[in-house]
Image: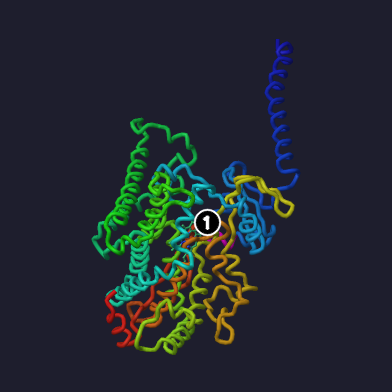
């Protein structure tokens, strides 16, 4: 009997194995054709299924990735749960892939959560294509270098508010920084003044902000199984649908009510706001300025700026938290490097004098303060890997095959901490940008890395740079920044370290902030912001 069954079992086993072998051979052949026989870039071997997840979850992962590049070269291949990832480790490969070939490398990874929780209008998360382009063009019209002049008075006003807040309560430095940037962006975008406390917009902001928990890895299965989005809310266990609905409603309410404020209020600030101007302007190539498409773009552009601004009220992942984090690093740097602070103050004393505060128009005559701004952007980079890009097609680079839908992670931190370009990169040294009392154009400009690359480069960079300059110049002119003191009045030494996240903040930026003189105090209080 056993002997009779043996051929049957052998045939069944063969019947199972052969299709696998054929499928494997076919997929190898398809891959060979697709990659034209080119190898993937080199990289460490990953584990089955999870791949190199461990390589992506290390403390100060930017340093770990620099080590990988030292071992494997400037282009390193990893995978995480099936997602192909390429680390770009030098300025040369970053510019070649993200700038010269940006038509192929300007996509973003798409999470199924984004539209479900009401973030579909945030264009920094949109896929590369026409819809994203329309948003970016509309945003850019208001943030290009020639438009910055228009925002200078609002930036100055809120820098003054910030200084008053520091005079009143210097211990709440981080809260004041967040408030001042959020208020600046909301004012410019919608013409709305955000009060310091009990503001109805702060409450709306809080509501939208609560969406961040949706992006906590592992919180919702939908991230891994997008099909779950079709489960109706009444099904037991589908309570997440209710939460998603509430977030969508909050985002809609915020966008709609701020949009109404900007377009219906009619006072000068509202009429001149970014959103009101965009709403009046017909889209390029279209006559109908009120078509639904146009209206969506206007509202989304406002929402993207608003999202950035409101996130600053509470630090989480958002594009414009970047300005907050950079200014926090600046305060820390000043308390740790008094020599740099003294030089910047000496320049301000000589150029501006004791009778007024500096402003944006003084920029050209304050090279050392400009060097401080550059060093603040370089020293503790906020987005160590920029916002990663994604490839839209299979491509070849330097003899390697890079598949479509590969995440490209430029190691901006490594470029900003390259000891050849910046000797002693861990130290805050504005003098590295100076030669003969002027900015030295031969030194690698940190803004080439801090603000990202190619078609996705930060469109708020000129605005951010101007905000940083205005705040840094005014603060240094009016305040001394020294280390924090313990209960015995002894200076606490703070080790500068950043949080381990995609968007980094100084772990500790406590410092002591005091007016430089009674004259400085008078200057701060003299003008009513
Ligand atoms: C120091 C401050 C800032 C830094 C360091 C910074 C940096 C960046 C970086 C690295 C990116 C990703 C670029 C890429 O994908 O290659 C980005 C994107 C973006 N930033 Fe900024 N940013 C800052 C301030 C701002 C501000 C104040 C705004 C708005 C007013 C803004 C608006 C945006 C937008 C809308 C995007 C998405 C662009 C797109 O996907 O097309 N940023 N930023």
Residue 28 x/y as whole percent: 72, 36
Residue 247 x/y as whole percent: 35, 45
Relative horizontal placement of residue 115, taking residue 402 as reference (left or right): left
Q: Quadrant of the N terminus?
A: top right
Ligand 1 within 8 Å, label 1 CB: yes
Residue 250 x/y as whole percent: 32, 47
Residue 49 x/y as whole percent: 59, 41
Q: Is residue 73 above or below residue 394?
A: below
Q: Which residue is mark 1?
A: 387
Q: Is residue 434 above or below residue 505?
A: below
The number of callouts visible is: 1
Residue 86 vs residue 491, the one in the foreground:
86
Is residue 119 something one can see in this rendering? no
- Label 1 crowd (10 A; few <14 / some 14-19 / many >=20): many
Quadrant of res 324: bottom left
Q: Residue at x 45, y 39 (%)?
A: 222
Q: Residue lying at the far left in this picture: please name it.
A: 198
Q: Is residue 446 magenta?
A: no
Is residue 172 something one can see in this rendering? yes
Relative horizontal placement of residue 457, taking residue 9 as reference (left or right): left
Q: Residue at x 52, y 63 (%)?
A: 451
Residue 6 vs residue 371, the one in the foreground:
371
Q: Quadrant of the C terminus?
A: bottom left
Q: Residue at x 37, y 35 (%)?
A: 238
Q: Is residue 366 above or below residue 328?
A: below
Q: Is residue 486 above or below residue 200?
A: below
| Magenta residues (range) | 57-64
Q: Residue lying at the far front in this picture: please name it.
A: 287
Residue 167 vs residue 296, the one in the foreground:
296
Secondary structure of residue under mark 1: loop
């Amino acid at each position: 009997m056993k002997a009779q069954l043996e051929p049957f079992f052998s045939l069944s086993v063969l019947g199972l194995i052969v299709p696998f072998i054929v499928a494997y051979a076919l997929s190898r052949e398809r891959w060979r054709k697709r990659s034209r026989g080119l190898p993937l870039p080199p990289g460490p071997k990953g584990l089955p299924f999870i791949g190199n997840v461990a390589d992506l979850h290390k403390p100060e992962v930017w340093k770990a990735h620099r080590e990988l590049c030292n071992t494997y070269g400037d282009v390193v291949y990893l995978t995480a749960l099936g997602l192909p990832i390429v680390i770009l480790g030098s300025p040369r490969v970053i510019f070649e892939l993200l700038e010269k070939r940006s038509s192929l490398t300007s996509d973003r990874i798409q999470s199924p959560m984004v539209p479900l929780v009401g973030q579909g209008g945030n264009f920094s998360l949109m896929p590369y294509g026409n819809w994203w382009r329309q948003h970016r063009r509309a945003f850019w019209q208001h943030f290009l270098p020639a438009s910055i002049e228009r925002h200078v008075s609002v930036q100055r006003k809120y820098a003054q508010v910030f200084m008053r807040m520091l005079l009143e309560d210097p211990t709440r430095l981080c809260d004041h920084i967040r408030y001042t940037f959020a208020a600046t962006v909301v004012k410019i975008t919608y013409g709305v003044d955000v009060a310091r406390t009990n503001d109805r917009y702060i409450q709306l902001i809080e509501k939208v902000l609560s969406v961040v928990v949706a992006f906590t890895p592992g919180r919702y299965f939908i991230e891994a199984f997008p099909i779950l989005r079709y489960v109706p809310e009444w099904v037991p266990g589908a309570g997440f649908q209710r939460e998603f609905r509430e977030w969508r409603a909050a985002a809609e309410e915020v966008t709609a009510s701020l949009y109404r404020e900007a377009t219906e209020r009619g006072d000068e600030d509202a009429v001149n706001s970014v959103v009101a101007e965009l709403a009046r302007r017909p889209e390029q190539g279209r006559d109908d300025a009120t078509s639904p498409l146009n209206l969506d773009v206007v509202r989304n552009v406002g929402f993207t700026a608003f999202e950035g601004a409101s996130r600053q009220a509470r630090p989480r992942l958002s594009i414009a938290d970047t300005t907050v984090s950079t200014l926090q690093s600046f305060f820390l740097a000043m308390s740790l490097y008094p020599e740099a602070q003294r030089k910047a103050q000496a320049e301000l004393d000589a150029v501006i004098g004791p009778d007024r505060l500096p402003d944006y128009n003084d920029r050209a005559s304050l090279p050392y303060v400009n060097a401080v701004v550059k060093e603040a952007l370089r020293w503790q980079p906020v987005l160590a890997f920029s916002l990663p890009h994604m490839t839209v097609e299979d491509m070849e680079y330097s003899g390697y095959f890079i598949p479509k839908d590969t995440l490209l992670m430029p190691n901006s931190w490594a470029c900003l901490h390259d000891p050849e370009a910046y000797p002693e990169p861990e130290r805050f040294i504005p003098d590295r940008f100076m030669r003969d009392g002027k900015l030295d154009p031969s030194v690698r400009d940190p803004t080439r890395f801090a603000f990202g690359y190619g078609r996705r480069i930060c469109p708020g960079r000129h605005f951010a740079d101007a905000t940083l300059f205005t705040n840094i110049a005014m603060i240094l002119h009016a305040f001394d920044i020294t280390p924090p003191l313990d209960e015995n009045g002894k200076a606490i030494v703070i080790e500068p370290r950043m949080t381990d996240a995609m968007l980094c903040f100084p772990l500790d930026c406590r410092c002591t902030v005091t007016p430089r003189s009674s004259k400085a105090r008078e200057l701060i209080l003299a003008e009513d912001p």
